[in-house]
Image (cartoon, rainbow, N blue to C red):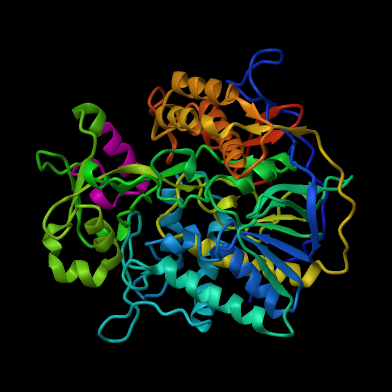
Amino acid sequence: MNNPESGARRPPAAPAADSRPAPGLPSPGTRGRAIGRELATPPVAWTDTAQVVVVGSGAAGLATTVELATAGIDTLVVTRGEITETATDWAQGGLAAVWSDEDSLALHVSDTLTAGAGLCDVDAVWDLVTNAPEAIEELITLGAQFDTDATGAYDLHLEGGHHARRILHAGGDATGREVQRTLSAALHAAILNPESSIRVRAHTRLIDVLTDADGAACGVRVIDADGRIGEIASPAVVLAAGGIGQLWSLTTNPSVATGDGIAAALRAGATIRDIEFVQFHPTILVVPEAHRRPGDRGVLISEAVRGEGAFLIDRTGARVMQGLHPLADLAPRDVVASSMEAHMARTGEPNLFLDATHFGADKWESHFPSILGMCRERGVDPVTEPIPVRPAAHYLCGGVSADLQGTTEVPGLYAVGEVAATGVQGANRLASNSVTEGLVAGERLGALLVGDRFGWTPAETVRRAAAPVTDPAALVDLRRATDEGVSVHRTDAGLRAALRTLAELPATDDFCHESLDAENLRTVGTLVATSALARTESRGCHRRADHPQQVPAWVRRLALRLNGGLRIRQEPINAEEDPE
């Protein structure tokens, strides 16, 4: 177990003197809605209390909760669906960690930094890589089972951007499900333990983080499955609410990935950074027209398929990545996705193809049974035909500014997992580092909270200026704007057009789950487009068609805060550096 340093409460950071109004947003007095400091809701129908509230039940949230359960801390888990309805459960990729004598911590760090394109916090990366094996071993102790080879050793996989086999998988392509199963079982055992104080409110979602007169978090406001508003008082709020993939029409993310945690953190006074860096996974199944179903999940064709020798081709059979990168089809995801988009734009093809027909049926059935089944259900047989694919929104590399133990600048507010920007992912996530980060950060935050947090009672909530939510009927226009202007390749004109559309989406006083979706997506969409407009270069998974080069002067983070409107500033990669 990690021994975190003391996490004594610290005051919120003052807005930086060099912050400025965010570009591309409506000027004061012009048409367009600003982002509110909290959302206007119906009256509160019920209340609750807990020493810790954990929002989200993926790997990071459950890793935190299991640590708290072991110590008997009164913890309430709030999750939008059932415990298992998470992006973790959908994850096909594995867990990255150094296991082999042919690998090294230094090589894992190097691969992570290379993928991160100059924006990783080196200390945070070393911290993650060093602690990753122990975190995974603790998961194994809880009962997780990973694939082994004929000798009984772990069957280590290779994925894009890695120079050594270091990826643990379970069930071939069902690693996330095994992680989710293991942690969910540990949570269930804790709930049944009469000495435990763990509770779960399923089908309940975050609206806002409550704050007191000092700006510290003191609980959450939520909406339950019946549409009733509740408030849970707590001196410690953990955001583990996942990403923002539902901002686009094509995504690998589950329907709950609407940016709830990031939007609520922003309204509560937190800083959001690196949010322009949205990873578009290169290979998402393009379902044939006859098999398309409304609301169907995006089927991700795992990086591991290319790791085992699959390659991208166009409709003529020509290799797409040949000669474009030393690693060809195993180049980092940002390189592959950008190359695919450029190829499709040049040729007019609506999609490309991933050819793994040379695997044969046995390899498909043993290594990638879930992907094979989902493809066949949608009219594509990878054993006999190339898979039609194109990039889709996948993973957010930025989020709520936090360190690797989850501490944010808002006292009492913590963020772990995809919702957090810890400096590990930089401008582009290295494949299979994400669930590993969630485990490391979750365990560390749990230990921090157990050690430091429980002589407190939450202070009285002070209401902030409330704003209406967005009409859910506007979601079609919202996603059209982000698909066209805030996708893989971006331009000044496209980003400004998207920002205008987002600012002018109509409001409603009808507060419900659908209008909350629309408002949070409008908020995170504004954040992504604002940072993307400000960053006039191409770096990592942020690509500007009108600024195609990487610019050394942009080895800086972009941070966004609400302070008399949305404001943006540049920050150094490491806090001790001079921002100038």
Q: Nearer the viewer, residue 322 or 463?
A: 463
Q: Is residue 201 visible?
A: yes
- The location of residue 304, given as percent across then percent down, is 30, 61
Snapshot quadrant of residue 393: top left
| Highlighted range, magenta | 322-342
Residue 451 lies within the magenta run: no
- The location of residue 14, given as percent across then percent down, is 79, 38
In-image side of 377 versus 1 (left or right): left
Snapshot quadrant of residue 264: top right
- How many discs appear? 0
In-image side of 79 versus 501 (left or right): right
- The location of residue 13, given as percent across then percent down, is 78, 42
Quadrant where the N terminus lies?
bottom right
- The location of residue 151, given as percent across then percent down, is 27, 86
Q: Nearer the viewer, residue 203 or 83?
A: 203
Q: What residue is drawn where x is 51% and y is 20%? A: 496
Quadrant where the C terminus lies?
top right
Q: Is residue 327 visible?
A: no
Height in image: 329 above or below 141? above
